[in-house]
Structure formats: structure tokens, C-alpha cells
Image: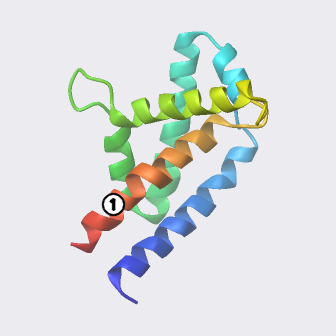
Amino acid sequence: MNIRTFFLTTAILTVATLATPFQADAMSVRQYESEPIKQRAAEASNAIQKIIDDVAKVNPALAQAIHDYFTPSDHSTAQGLIDFEGGLSAVDNLAAQGKLDLDKVQIEGILLDVVKTDIMPKFAKNAAR
């Protein structure tokens, strides 16, 4: 097995592992957007930390990459949070078109999509070097 196959397999298993635990305490986008801004920040932070904790059990280096992506390195906004807001906007746009129900989309799913599409490919590419 080459290094790329190894990291892709690890990535798939990590996402599959992460998707299951969120079912019990998942928060819908509608519920999330109805919360005050401070509560939203706390909910997003808790969901991100849960992802990091779960990934750390399987792949500590990937967990660190996720942490770094969602944590600002200076006084600016972290790229992960910008991507999360972009995902929320995309979901809101689809809901406005009647293509999905905000009660059925979870913020954790949007965060996992950011991890899957933005962090994991970069992580796998850097690890292959």
C-alpha cells in the first residue's frame, strides 16, 4: 500500500467514524441560526472540539491540522471558520430555493464537509511528501 492510499483510507475511516457520534446531540442549521451569536459561537466551538477529539484517537497529526485550520494564528478569522460560514450560506441558499430542509441539515455535517474538502486533501498531500 502506498502512502497516498494509506492516507485516503485513513481519511475515509475517520469521516465514517466521526459521522456516527453526532447523531445523539446534533444541532440543525435552523436551531443553530435561531440561537444568539454567543451561543452559536459556543456550539460551533464545541462541535469543532468534538471533531478534533474524535480524530485524535485515530490520527493525532490530522487532529492537529484540523485544530490549526479552525484556530486563528493571529487576530484574523481562521480560514476554517470562514469556510464554515460559507457552508452555512450555501445551505441557506438551497433552503431558500426549496431544495433542502434546514431542520435536517446539521452544523456538524457542514463542519465535517469543511474537514473533508479543505483539510484532508492538503493533509494527505503534505503527508505524501
Q: Looking at the rendering, which quadrant does residue 4 occupy?
A: bottom left
Q: Is disc 1 surrounded by few (<14), some (14 to 19) or many (20+) residues within 10 Å?
A: some
Q: Position of residue 101 (x, y in %)?
A: 79, 32
One can see residue 67 in this view: yes
Q: In which quarter of the image is the N terminus?
A: bottom left
102 with respect to 80 (left or right): right
Q: Which residue is drawn at 49% across and 31% down?
A: 86
Q: Can residue 61 be seen in this view?
A: no
Viewer-side residue, 73 vs 56: 73
**Secondary-structure class at tag 1:** helix
Q: Would you place residue 118 above or below residue 125 in this image? A: above
Which quadrant of the rendered structure holds the C terminus? bottom left
Query: What's the residue at 41%, 30% (across, down)?
Result: 82
Residue 63 is left or right of residue 103, and the answer is left
- For the rendered model, the colour scheme is rainbow
- Looking at the picture, does residue 60 appear above or below residue 24? below
Residue found at x 41% / y 58%: 120
In the rendered view, would you say 88 is above or below 75? below
Corner quadrant of residue 8: bottom left
- Which corner quadrant of the image does residue 35 belong to? top right
Tell me the residue that label 1 is attached to. Answer: 123
At label 1, which amino acid type do we have? Phe
Outermost residue toward the top? 36
Determine the residue positioned at 49% across, 54% down: 116
Q: Is residue 96 left or right of residue 80?
A: right
> Residue 79 placed where, x, y %?
34, 35
Which is nearer the eye, 1 or 49? 1
Outermost residue toward the front in this view? 97
Task: Name the spot of residue 97 as percent of width and height, x first.
Answer: 73, 28
Residue 123 image position (x, y, % from top left): 33, 60
